């Protein structure tokens, strides 16, 4: 069975869901790509070999993105190759060695001078981590930690591996290595590294063992889907295949000093996160703006009075509070607008994990809750909290507790799921925007003080950014980067996970207030015997699993007859494999 995943950006406009395509021919095997001094070769599982690209100059690193484009570095320039071999320059970045993508689609490059660079989709790079001694290889584990091997001058035993966590903390994972080249993780999360002619295996807690001893020094490593490990031996010009049982064989030979190698991504693995568009309210100009990940701007909606807070429900509808006319509007992904609730003074909006909508009413100082009943959101207000002085931003933590910024008294309130109120933090100037990162750390934009503060789960405060001009809305994208609206300067800043700041958008003619990222809805699939198992988040309400046998217009989608059951927190449907190709999607 061949399994592919395409995003709606490829096929359908603004559905906001993933589409999974199933066909009947088995195609899980991957082609291996290897580069020597001047060529890139593509090698099929049976050993059949073709020249994919030629005329290169000592390529040092290669990595595939989730679309199947190959990225290759030579002499500081990173080139991108489409699957049919079309070559273009992606970016100029001096002194790169190894390349790697994280699971969110960001590319990272090891700079031999000692830095690790994160490179945005538009080719703009920033320093992600620094202080390494000649880093040559990088790889991510399943928890998004980055591992870096450094040769440290090449002296025997001087090489080491550094672990960089998602918050930028560095620690030595392994040391005493001989020019460690090649890093690769197996499906169990164990790390493999070439140290001279030895390949070491490290368990997740750092226990080292010798996995294989080869005839020549290892230049790079890569695993295929079957768990076989492949190693380039540069000086001998060959690629060695090592089976899960340790059996070694020559997979291909006759290359001129081969170094980097990478497997073409298997389609079954391409069910990860896709890029999200950012939506921003314009306040007095009555507009809602939509920004692509590259910063391209368009107007999603106009003709509102004073749109302030905004929030997406789990199925991709956008809710916007209009402080001018007192309405909350609902926008479908296609931009169709309807009035959800009226007679309010909405400032901020947020959804909890059950699909209930919460609204800060700034005239009354109340927080209202709109309940979700089996996928239908009621427009009737329920009083959740009252007596607040001037409540502003809202955010929920992973436990379902609601946090509220009180603009005038400089405090952050925490409301437990039963409504119990307590003061979580105080002493700020005028806190407004709130957002939680994936680890549960609360980020607070202090509108009056021009700073962004962080608070750990037990309330320990630190300053994340300062010198800003009226920070207002905050939001995290799926990659963990923080976006902040600087209201006075009319700039949207982006902060990487290690705190590096860059300007995402600067538009002196537009007003920006609050912001939210379009949600990512994942329809994932797995094989189980003669069945296909499809699953998606339980909080993706009012969505049905549909299928069709043909994508040629007009497409006839049929709602799946199998009722989902909840397994491990996911809606799950099990379908038998048939002899006919099928296409699946989530839809209303």
Image (tube, rainbow, N blue to C red):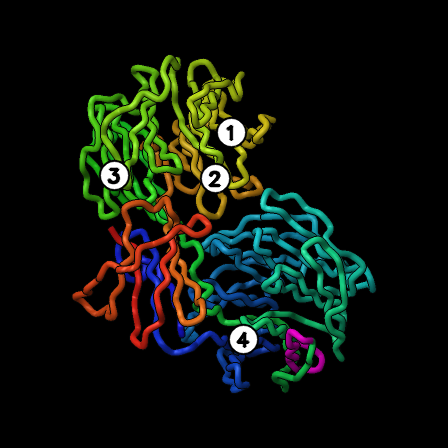
Give the mark, 4 or 3, whose residue is nearer the N terminus: 4
- The residues tagged by marks 3 and 2 sit, at their Cα atoms, a distance apart of 31 Å
Q: Which mark is residue 452?
A: 1
- The residues tagged by marks 1 and 2 sit, at their Cα atoms, a distance apart of 11 Å
Give the mark, 1 or 2, whose residue is nearer the N terminus: 1
> Can you give x and y, in whole percent of width and height, for residue 51 in the image?
50, 82
> Can you give x and y, in whole percent of width and height, for residue 404 in the image?
43, 24
Which secondary structure lies at badge 4? strand
Identify the residue at horizontal 49%, vertical 59% (top origin): 91
- The quarter of the picture where residue 75 lies is bottom right
Mark 2 crowd level (few <14, some 14–19, many ≥20, 10 Å Cα): many
Q: Which residue is mark 2?
A: 482
Q: Which residue is mark 4?
A: 33
- The quarter of the picture where residue 525 lies is bottom left
Identify the residue at horizontal 74%, vertical 77% (top origin): 214
Asked whether disc 1 touches disc 4, contact meaning CB atoms under 8 Å apart, the reply is: no
- The residues tagged by marks 4 and 3 sit, at their Cα atoms, a distance apart of 50 Å
Give the mark, 2 or 4, whose residue is nearer the N terminus: 4
Which secondary structure lies at badge 2? strand
* Of residues 231 and 568, the one drawn nearer to the viewer in this rendering: 568
Q: Does residue 470 appear in this view?
A: no
Which secondary structure lies at badge 3? strand
Q: Is residue 554 above or below residue 295?
A: below
Q: In the shown orientation, is residue 563 left or right of residue 274?
A: left
């Amino acid at each position: 069975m061949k399994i592919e995943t395409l995003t709606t950006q490829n096929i359908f406009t603004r559905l906001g869901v993933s589409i999974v395509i199933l066909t009947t021919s088995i195609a899980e095997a991957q082609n291996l790509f290897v580069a020597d001094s001047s060529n890139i070769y593509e090698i099929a599982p049976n050993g059949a070999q073709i020249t994919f690209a030629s005329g290169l100059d000592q390529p040092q690193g290669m990595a595939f993105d989730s679309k199947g484009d190959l990225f290759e570095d030579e002499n500081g320039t990173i080139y991108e190759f489409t699957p049919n071999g079309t070559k273009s320059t992606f970016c100029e970045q001096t002194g790169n060695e190894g390349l790697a993508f994280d699971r969110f689609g960001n590319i990272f490059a090891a700079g031999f001078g000692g830095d690790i660079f994160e490179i945005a989709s538009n080719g703009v790079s920033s320093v992600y981590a620094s202080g390494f001694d000649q880093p040559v290889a990088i790889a991510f584990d399943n928890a998004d930690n980055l591992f870096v091997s450094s040769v440290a001058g090449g002296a025997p035993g001087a090489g080491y591996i550094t672990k960089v966590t998602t918050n930028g903390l560095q620690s030595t994972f392994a040391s005493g290595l001989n020019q460690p080249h090649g890093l690769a993780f197996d499906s169990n999360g164990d790390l493999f590294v070439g140290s001279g002619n030895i390949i070491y295996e490290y368990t997740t807690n750092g226990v080292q063992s010798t996995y294989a001893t080869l005839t020549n020094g290892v230049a790079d490593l890569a695993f295929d889907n079957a768990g076989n490990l492949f190693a380039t031996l540069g000086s001998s010009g060959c690629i060695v295949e090592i089976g899960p049982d340790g059996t070694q064989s020559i997979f291909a030979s006759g290359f001129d000093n081969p170094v980097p190698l990478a497997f073409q991504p298997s389609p079954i693995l391409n069910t990860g996160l896709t890029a999200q568009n950012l939506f921003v309210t314009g306040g007095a100009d009555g507009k809602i703006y939509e920004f692509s990940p590259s910063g391209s701007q368009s107007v999603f909606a106009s003709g509102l009075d004073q749109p302030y807070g905004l929030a997406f429900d789990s199925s991709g509808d956008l809710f916007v509070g209009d402080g001018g006319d007192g309405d909350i509007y609902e926008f479908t992904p296609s931009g169709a607008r309807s009035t959800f609730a009226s007679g309010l003074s909405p400032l901020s909006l947020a959804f909890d994990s059950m699909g209930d909508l919460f609204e800060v009413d700034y005239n009354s100082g109340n927080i209202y809750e709109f309940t979700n009943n089996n996928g239908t959101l009621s427009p009737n207000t329920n009083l959740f909290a009252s007596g607040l002085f001037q409540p502003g931003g809202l955010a929920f933590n992973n436990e379902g507790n609601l946090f509220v910024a009180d603009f005038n008294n400089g405090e952050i309130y925490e409301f437990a799921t039963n409504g119990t109120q307590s003061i979580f933090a105080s002493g700020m100037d005028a806190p407004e925007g709130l957002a939680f990162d994936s680890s549960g750390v609360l980020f607070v934009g202090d509108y009056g003080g021009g700073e962004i503060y962080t608070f750990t789960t037990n309330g320990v405060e630190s300053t994340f950014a300062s010198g800003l001009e009226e920070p207002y809305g905050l939001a995290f994208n799926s990659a963990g980067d923080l976006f902040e609206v600087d209201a006075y300067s009319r700039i949207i800043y982006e902060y990487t996970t290690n705190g590096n700041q860059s300007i995402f958008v600067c538009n002196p003619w537009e007003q920006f207030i609050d912001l939210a990222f379009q949600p990512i809805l994942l329809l994932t699939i797995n094989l189980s015997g003669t069945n296909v198992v499809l699953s998606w988040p339980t909080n993706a309400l009012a969505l049905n699993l549909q299928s069709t046998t043909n994508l040629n217009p007009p497409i006839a989608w049929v709602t799946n007859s199998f009722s989902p059951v909840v397994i491990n927190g996911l809606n799950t449907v099990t379908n038998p494999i048939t002899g006919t190709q099928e296409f699946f999607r989530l839809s209303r």
